[in-house]
Structure formats: structure tokens, C-alpha cells
Amino acid sequence: MFFNDASGFEEGYARDNNISIYYRDYGPANGIPILLVMGLGGQLTFWPPYMIRYLQQKGFRPIAYDNRDMGLSSRFESNPTFLANILKYYFYFPIKSEYKLDDMAKDAVLLLDTLKIDKCHVIGMSMGGMISQILVSNHQERFSSYTQIASMVAVPSPLNGPNFSVIRLLGERAFKNSTKEERINRTIRLVSTIGMQGFDYNNYEFKQEVSETIERSPDDSGFVRQMAAILGTKNRIDKVKTISVPTLIIHGKTDPLIKVKNAFHTHKLIKNSKIKIIDNMGHLIEEPVFNQFKIDLKDHLEINC
């Protein structure tokens, strides 16, 4: 339905010093590579199967990976407090983190080097868009195009980020010692709030998919550390201004997690960019939403090959 159940992939790890990044290369081997960079708390399996298949059908080679601290990639050890960081968020106090988004961008470079990919397209979703901004600005010669979905340039704040009700739902994920059923139910509450309004997530199939993602990676402590990395990394305005790679910005008009004004901000900063605002899109890529921008995405990728 929503989580990636695509089969027929090659898998492995990109390793360097103390970091291991798990990836799936969906092929085909002769396809044009596209690096998929997932958002906060998302495993690589969160990329929708219909999106993976569509890209393959159009001659591309999707490559997805688990960001550090998520899925099957390396875990870290610090134990930041969600509540303390949210209070700092509201009062604009600095937030410390064990690593920064810049380190996560280096993980992506490590993966490309491991796969011996000199140049590719990149699609970044939410936090993955933030990582991709750093990645592209630092290595523009390695990217044919950049696609940003539901992301932002500035550091999230009460003015441009989620409202309190969404933060409260995010905070539920920080609860430790939750049962699998509790984790499934809170996932349904969250995606029903931040996703496409009226989309039915409260069904058996979706619950099974969430259950499988929990079994794949029971340790969810990386979510709070990734959030600290977002809040603890300086804004990327100066970096994003330097991006000359052709860019497509996709955002939901009703996104309750990252307000749509952030998309227009990015569009203003990147001179060589186009923007696509989708009326009934929230923060996720449900199939009805994907169907509204897949042609734009295909054209953007093909014209910049």
C-alpha cells in the first residue's frame, strides 16, 4: 500500500571508520541512478513501491538507504530528551546533537563512492531534503538534478515549523518501552494528521506494513537523535543560494509539518528551480498525491539527464 515492498533489489553496506549505511539498489543496472534520501525517523522502506516502480519503468535506477540511526544502519548512543529540546525550540535556545545534517550528507557521499557512482539525480524528502541541500551544494558536479519534496532551508521554528498538535504527536514517538500495538496506533494517528486529509490509514493492510517496519528495526531511539540533528544544525540559506543544479520543488499546500511557505523560500533561493504546489497534499506521498506530480518529476529527470 504505502511502505516499500518492492522486490528484486541488491543490498549491502557502505562502510567507513565507525559508520555503516545500509542500502538497497533496485536497478536495473543500466538505469540512470537516482539517490533517494528519506526524512526524519523514516526507514528506506518508507519510499512508496509505486514510486520505485514508476522510476524503474521510466529507465531510472532508484537507490534508497537507511540514514544513520535508522533502519539497519549504524546507531549512536546519546540520549537527548525530546521535551527539553522542544522547550529550547520554542524559546530559540541552541540545541546540541551528537551529529549534524552535514555528517548525514557525508554518509550519502560514502554510499555513492561505494557504488562507484560519479553522477546521479537526487530526491530528498523532508529531512532528506535538508540533507540533500548540503549534499548538492557541496558536490554540484556529481548531480544531474535535485528534487526536493516537503522540505525547508531554515532551521525549524514555531514560525515555520509544525504546530503544537503535530509536535505532541511527534513527542509520542519518543516514549520508551511502548508495545508494538502502541507504536502502530501512534503511527496511524501521526500519518493521519500529517498526510493527505481523508486518506484511510486505519486499515489492516497498513497496520501490517507498520508492524513489519517495527520488526525490521525495533530500536526507535534514533528518532530523537535525528530530530536533534535537524534542530542543532545551522540554517542552509548560504549553501542553498549556491545551488545551480536544476531543481524541482514539490510541496503540499496543506502540509502541517513543514509549512508551504518554506517551498517558496527555497524556490527564491535557487535560481534554477521550478515549483509544484499540490492542493490536497500534506507531508506524505500517498498514491493519489504521487499521481499529481509524477509527470512533472519524470520530465524534470529526463530533461536533465
Image (cartoon, rainbow, N blue to C red):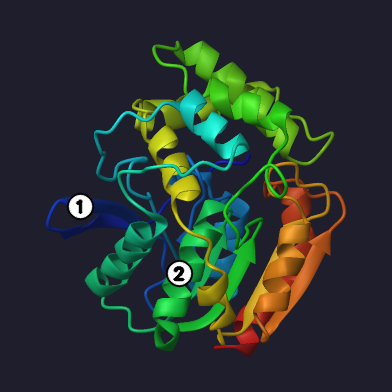
Number of labelled discs?
2
- Dot 2 falls on a residue whose secondary structure is helix
Image location (x, y in percent) of residue 154:
60, 59
Dot 2 amino acid type: Ile
Q: Residue furthest right?
A: 279
Q: Position of residue 100 (x, y in %)?
A: 37, 54
- Bin the neighbour count of mark 1 within 10 Å (Cα to Cα): few under 14, some 14-19, many 20 and up: some
Tell me the tag on residue 19: 1
Depicted 41 relative to depicted 61: above or below: above
* Residue 59 seen anywhere in this rendered image of the structure: no
The amino acid sitting under disc 1 is Ile
Q: Quadrant of the C terminus?
A: bottom right
- The residue sitting at 69% across, 23% down in the picture is 203
Which residue appears at 29% of the width and 51% of the height?
22
Front residue of 164 and 305: 164
Q: Quadrant of residue 245?
A: bottom right
Residue 220, which numbered label? none
Residue at the limit of the structure toward the left, as seen here:
17
- Say if mark 2 contacts mark 1, CB within 8 Å: no
Quick one: SS at disc 1? strand
Front position in the image: 227 or 93 = 93
- Which residue does the numbered mark 2 point to in the structure image? 134
Q: In the picture shown, does residue 184 fall above or below 216? A: above
Task: From the viewer's side, name the closer residue of 41 and 225.
Answer: 225
